[in-house]
Image: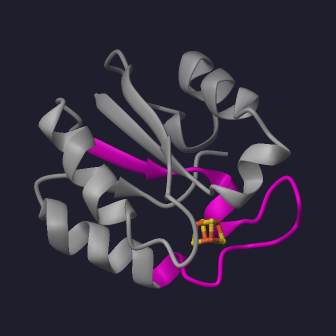
């Protein structure tokens, strides 16, 4: 799996993404049960509210080899602040439309 992770820009001040890297490395959370190696091709923020830049950033991750895009848990689950993104569903829709169905979307990392 070649993985690109998109995270919440608002959460960057609070969280360096440590758990995301851990669950990818240890194949836990959303990555449990994946047999193949996981190569992280990029880890980038949404670009700020309302998340329209996710389209550009997902496109770039795919251009750089990503076959899977994961939204970090800060977006849909609101971790670690307890503040889920109000634009999460729309972001997912526009990213999927941009990258096509050949690219797998994962809704959270852990
Ligand atoms: S659009 Fe959502 S994910 Fe991006 S900074 Fe705003 S709240 Fe965070």
Q: Kindly indicate the quadrant of the structure image that contains residue 98.
A: bottom left
Residue 4 coordinates in the image, percent (x, y): 37, 38
Vertical order, 23 against 80 (above or below)? above
In the rendered image, residue 83 lying in the magenta stretch gets the answer: yes
Q: Kindly indicate the quadrant of the structure image that contains residue 14.
A: top right
Q: Kindly indicate the quadrant of the structure image that contains residue 8.
A: bottom right
Residue 38 coordinates in the image, percent (x, y): 38, 21
Residue 78 coordinates in the image, percent (x, y): 76, 65
Which is more toward the observer, 48 or 74? 48
For image coordinates 25% across by 69% down, the residue present is: 96
Which is more toward the observer, 59 or 73? 59
Answer with left or right where residue 102 lies relative to residue 53. Answer: left
Which is more toward the observer, 42 or 103? 42
Answer with left or right where residue 28 lies relative to residue 52. Answer: right
Answer with left or right where residue 60 lies relative to residue 80. Answer: left
For image coordinates 81% across by 46% down, the residue present is: 13
Vertical order, 87 against 80 (above or below)? below
Quadrant where the N terminus sits is top left
Vertical order, 95 against 36 (above or below)? below
In the rendered image, residue 4 lying in the magenta stretch gets the answer: no
Quadrant where the C terminus sits is top right
Residue 25 coordinates in the image, percent (x, y): 57, 17
Answer with left or right where residue 9 lies relative to residue 2. Answer: right
The magenta region covers 68-89
For image coordinates 88% across by 67% down, the residue present is: 82
Vertical order, 98 against 74 (above or below)? below
Image quarter for ligand 1 equals: bottom right
């Amino acid at each position: 799996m070649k993985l690109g992770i998109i995270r919440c820009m608002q959460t960057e001040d609070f969280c360096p993404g440590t758990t995301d890297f851990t669950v990818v490395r240890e194949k836990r959370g959303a990555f449990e049960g994946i047999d193949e190696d996981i190569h992280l091709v990029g880890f980038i923020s949404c670009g700020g509210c309302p998340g329209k830049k996710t389209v550009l950033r997902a496109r770039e991750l795919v251009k750089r080899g990503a076959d899977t895009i994961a939204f970090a848990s800060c977006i849909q689950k609101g971790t670690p602040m307890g503040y889920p993104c109000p634009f999460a569903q729309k972001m997912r829709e526009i990213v999927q439309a941009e990258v096509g169905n050949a690219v797998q979307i994962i809704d959270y990392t852990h």
